[in-house]
Image (tube, rainbow, N blue to C red):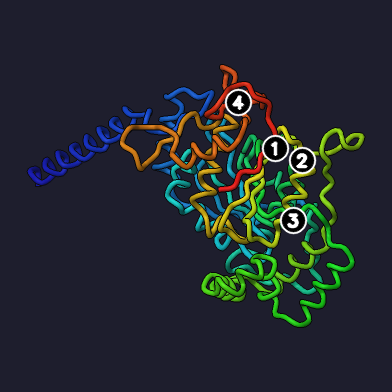
Amino acid sequence: MKVLGHRLELLTGLLLHDVTMAGLQELRFPEEKPLLRGQDATELESSDAFLLAADTDWKEHDIETPYGLLHVVIRGSPKGNRPAILTYHDVGLNHKLCFNTFFNFEDMQEITKHFVVCHVDAPGQQVGASQFPQGYQFPSMEQLAAMLPSVVQHFGFKYVIGIGVGAGAYVLAKFALIFPDLVEGLVLVNIDPNGKGWIDWAATKLSGLTSTLPDTVLSHLFSQEELVNNTELVQSYRQQIGNVVNQANLQLFWNMYNSRRDLDINRPGTVPNAKTLRCPVMLVVGDNAPAEDGVVECNSKLDPTTTTFLKMADSGGLPQVTQPGKLTEAFKYFLQGMGYIAYLKDRRLSGGAVPSASMTRLARSRTASLTSASSVDGSRPQACTHSESSEGLGQVNHTMEVSC
């Protein structure tokens, strides 16, 4: 027994030695990981090791808000000066149907391992949600936005970078208007800033009488060309919308989205006391998307010094699903413009951390980019107007339409 015990102790010691050496080896090469401006290598090493080792799994939470429970899934823990990436899905979907393809993309995972990621499901839209009782009043779009500070407070986020699609983009834009100090940046895909007029409202009602709810929602998500030609993708979403999302709950969300009011924004200087989004914004739409007109109009109402308009070629109503690589590259550049990624590692090259080829194309497509400068003590970065693009420094920012 003594010999056996001695062998167990020796084996345990060897294992602990191997684990320790593996940890030391990982920490010896911090230059292989994207660094965040305003953080030293020691902070990054310890926080990234924690994110990768201790928080690799998604954790589900039901958070109490002034307007009811909100289902949230989160990966990672708040660290240093980094904001959380917070997502909000489109109507007819949930965080899985809307964002799984995008966030599971290999290059996107290279980004998200350095941030807390928080997916928000609209009330009753998550997988396995119970049906709301008869007479339940679904929150308005403004109330959906007002639920998000409870999420921020619950997890101790300082501020967030929001990624929203369709209805979720509208909610996050409203959130940024009401609580600007909590939002560091926004990526808004397929946003429509306009409320439904009487003609649109009547057309929606008529469509609801002649089509099933999944088919009605599909016409919101996909263009007519996609509905006809991309049958495999459309059929997949038709089945999942019908089987995964509770139909009664979806109907309530759909009705509330179609009764939304105009997003109260105007380009600064066009009207007295104009309201606008104060943070950097990247607007995204496919060149064959039903939301294209709405996104173009939203672009015309935002501050041109802080807005990028990205139109994706060969992409329809769900660019995060059909073109995750292009959107990831754009998102990397967006983060770099805000100063959160000092440089990027291209996994396809062995020469170290350099901008990828497609990222370089995006950089050169803009005349300027937003940058941020962090103070020595790691305070929140403040936007400035110097360029970080690959061609020329110090240029004035303008709204740019980038086709890729």
User: Do we see residue 152 in this rendering?
Assistant: no
For the residue pair 120 and 191, the one nearer the viewer reads as: 191
Q: Secondary structure at mark 1?
A: loop
User: Which residue is rendered at x = 54% and y = 35% of the image?
Assistant: 363
Question: What mark, if any, has residue 302 been given in the picture?
Answer: 2
Up/down of 335 relative to 118, above or below? above
Q: Which residue is mark 1?
A: 399
Q: What residue lies at 33% left-to-right and 29% top-to-bottom? A: 29
> Residue at point 66% right, 44% down?
309
- Closer to us: mark 2 or mark 3? 3
Label whose residue precedes the other's in the sequence (1 or 3): 3
- Name the kind of residue labelled 1 in the image: Thr
Dots 1 and 4: beta carbons under 8 Å? no
**First-in-chain label (2 vs 3):** 3
Q: Which of the two labelled residues, at mark 4 and mark 3, occupies the earlier sequence position?
A: 3
- Alpha-carbon neighbours of circle 1 within 10 Å: few (<14), some, or many (≥20)? many
> Which residue matches tag 3?
293
- Which amino acid lies under the numbered mark 4 shown in the image of this protein? Ser
Residue 253 drawn above or below residue 261: below
Mark 3 neighbour density, 10 Å: few (under 14) some (14–19) many (20 or more): some
Q: Secondary structure at mark 2?
A: loop
Three-letter code, disc 3: Asp
Dot placed on the residue nearer the N-terminal end, 2 or 1:
2
Say which of 179 and 369 sits in front: 369
Name the amino acid, label 2: Leu
| Mark 2–mark 1 distance (CA, rounded to whole Å) | 9 Å
Q: Quadrant of residue 276?
A: top right
Residue designated by label 4: 387
Residue 46: x and y in percent read 42, 31
Marks 1 and 3, how far apart in space?
Answer: 17 Å
